[in-house]
Amino acid sequence: MSSMILLSSSSFFLPTYLTKQIKDNNYSRGQFSFALKKSYVIALIIQEKQADLGSNNWIALNRELAKTQWLSALKLARWYQGKSKNKSRELLFSKAIMWFEQAIRLGSQQAIVALAQLYFQQNKIIKAQATLRQLPEVIPSNNVSEAALILDIIIAIHLGDSTQVKQLLNSGTAVGFQHSNMLNLLLADIDKYAISNFSTKLKDVEDVKVNLSSPSCISSLQLFATNLKHLKHLEQLIQTFNTQQPLAQYVCLSTPRYISIKRLDCMAQPQHTITCDETLWRTIAEDVDSRHIGLMLNEGKANVHFGILYFDANDNAEVFSHEVSHLLGFVDEYPLIKGHNKCQGIQSKPFSHNIAVLKKYYQGDKKELRAKILKNVSWANSINANTPILQVIDKTPDKENIWLLGTPLEYKDKIGIYISESCQKSNSDYSDLPSRTTSINQVTRYSAFKPLSRRTQLRYFANDFPKEYLTLIKENPSDYFMPSFHYNIALALYQQGEVSNAKYWLSQAAQWENNLMRKARVLIGEL
């Protein structure tokens, strides 16, 4: 009887006893196995440290520990978060969120910030803000307090709330971290990207000087983004463009700049061309010393509208180079949309470096026709005199020959005049031949033509930008430039009926033109 009472009494104290023995490293293998079987926390912790990260055993041990230990719940949350980045699986994200929430229930303030960061990365801004509000006013951990402050600032930047940014930077919490590397790195970004004209008292950050991509550049482009993630992405994109794309030598690209989303009114949806209310660019015009501007948004199809380039965060350096080429005066060599203004009929004069819209059929003396056609082709000087541009399709003794415009395939490696797909959707007579009974002068069939037979970056983004096109830029650097972005502002104002204001912005655009003829056309809005 006494032994039964002793056994019962000692078993009541057994967890405490074994836990102490294990903590003191004074236990047998049998005692440890028993503690592990009974899920004593100390035994589970020791076993978890010995398990391979991410193994089934590691996961099982942390799941058991996470019932009472917030650190284990946090470990699981971060592990699932890391896995979801690599595999992009929504289920893994959900598991990460579940374990972050468990860690929060167990009292982890660190998990609150980590979950808010995850929501922000998923662009769930409201959930991120709501999660951060779970933090107490006084946070014992400096690391948690600083991380929360930085995330608050980044969210305010993302939302375009410059007032909130200033308030957070002026707060006592921020002052308390004046020697923090993390906060000062953020402050450096705020200064570098011109996110706020707020002069921080925390640390003097050296001004970032504008670095031109090349001393030989003939145009300038200022890029904008609405949040820190995109601004940093722009810097990487510029670096890749400058090192890998030959067009970089002609474009001055300075440090990307921030623009508040509140200062924009844009339509940006997947598979739809990005469009914005361009009257709003007036608010930044006085602070921008570049001919063209560009805006990166989260989604939407890239395009160039006169002096403004729009693109999204998924576009790579090849797409960016393609769009920059439009600013410099190149036209797409893939099929343009039906009814495109460049495909409405035969051109009256050259309008781009690489595309000419011309009649397909001619009748008369070959030499005279060649001279007449080349006067209307911007790359005429690059066509060798021995490279033909006309092919006979109807040769009769009593009539003048009928010619088809185009360089024969045997000269495909030479600069010439080749059919381009550019106006394919707009010209219903794309492949028809003229009738023998129809006068050639009555035939209005036309097509777009290009200098090279091969496909270039103007056709497929992944293709190279050809060296022959670089030569065209050198020979004629400015005639086919897009006007400055001030022209966009003028056009948008004119369309809204603000004629007098539109004239002012046309005068601003004209200041970027060196050619007197172009200057005159810009002043009257004819480009």
Image (cartoon, rainbow, N blue to C red):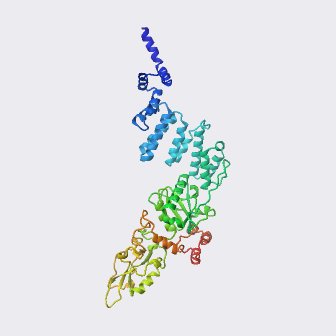
Residue at (51, 23) in percent of width and height: 24
* 36 and 246: which is toward the camera: 246
Residue 104 visible in the current orientation: yes
x and y percent of residue 368 in the render? 42, 87
Q: Is residue 29 left or right of residue 140?
A: left
Residue at (48, 37) in percent of width and height: 75
Residue 161 visible in the current orientation: no
x and y percent of residue 509 in the render? 59, 70
Q: Is residue 359 above or below residue 465?
A: below
Residue at (48, 27) in percent of width and height: 42
Which corner quadrant of the image does residue 256 belong to?
bottom right
x and y percent of residue 5 in the render? 44, 11
* 36 and 497: which is toward the camera: 36
Q: Is residue 521 above or below residue 436?
A: above
* 162 and 79: which is toward the camera: 79
Residue lying furthest top: 1
